[in-house]
Image (cartoon, rainbow, N blue to C red):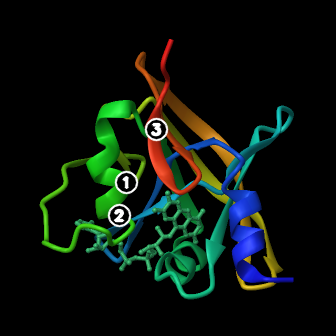
Amino acid sequence: MDDRVFREAMGKFATGITIITTLEDGEIHGMTANAFMSVSLDPKLVLVSIGEKARMLDKIKKTGKFAVNILSADQKEYSMYFAGQIKEKRDVEFVRINGIPIIRQALANILCTVHSKHVAGDHTLFIGEVHEIIVQEGEPLLFFEGKYREIKN
Ligand code: FAD
């Protein structure tokens, strides 16, 4: 099957956008990801899928901890920046909770330790056990057909 057809079909699934964050040897690393889902309520588990070329992959393997930061509609620049779509270096302000960096003013910060991991083709699925959550009010940043969107009421 053609890669383009696969991408086009996957792009029909509207998602929110997250920044995955972790701290390795005192250095914070962030990466934009929309391959995120809730997995289980008891225990509380979530899943992220990280590509084999992403620097984030080795970092989560080493630290065994990460946060999923669900972006609000006014945090599009964060998404572009942590996907490498904005090239110039920026100073991003993080808050640390129990040694895990999180993004301020995200709609939700979900702090996890790695419960299990599964290599699936060119990605690794990390299942995270959730041990802390911070939630804020606001509108979400959305992604559909390769473009950023916002909810129109
Ligand atoms: P890099 O490419 O090295 O870093 C990303 C950017 O963040 C760089 O500009 C870097 O300078 C900056 N940065 C990182 N940490 C800091 C810091 N502490 N302070 C300042 N700047 C910092 N890929 C997946 O594997 N899974 C997905 O689910 C996924 N979903 C995506 C959804 C969207 C909408 C987009 C646009 C991209 C998605 N990607 C996904 C692709 C992924 O975001 C990029 O390939 C990303 O560049 C890979 O990150 P990396 O870990 O290799 O880090």
Type of amino acid at the residue the image marks with label 3: Arg
Type of amino acid under label 1: Ser
User: In the picture, residue 73 is in which quadrant?
Assistant: top left
Mark 1, residue position: 79
Nearest to N terminus: mark 3 or mark 2 = 2
Q: Is mark 2 within 8 Å of ligand 1?
A: yes
Instruction: Tell me residue 90's x, y (percent).
Output: 13, 63
What residue is shown with label 2? Answer: 82
* Alpha carbon distance from label 3 to label 1: 12 Å
Q: Nearer the viewer, mark 3 or mark 1?
A: 3
Q: Is the shortest distance between ligand 1 and the CB of mark 1 under 8 Å?
A: yes
Label 2 sits on a secondary structure element that is loop
Q: Position of residue 23 (x, y in %)?
A: 39, 66
Q: CA distance from mark 3 to mark 2?
A: 17 Å
Q: For the residues marked 1 and 2, what is the alpha-carbon distance in whole angstroms?
A: 5 Å
- 135, 4: nearer the viewer: 4
**Does 17 appear above or below 87?**
above
Badge 3 vs badge 1, beta-carbon distance below 8 Å: no
As drawn, 60 above or below 66: below
Quadrant hosting residue 6: bottom right
Q: Amino acid at mark 2?
A: Phe
Q: Position of residue 77 (x, y in %)?
A: 27, 50
Residue drawn at the location 76% of the way across and 71% of the way down: 5
Q: Mark 3 or 1 closer to N-term?
A: 1
Residue 15 relative to residue 27: left or right: right
* Residue at position x 54%, y 83% in the image: 58
Q: Nearer the viewer, residue 112 or 48?
A: 48
Can residue 26 be seen here? The reply is: yes
Side (left or right) of 109 relative to 103: right
Q: Which labelled disc corresponds to residue 149?
A: 3
Q: Position of residue 45 (x, y in %)?
A: 76, 45
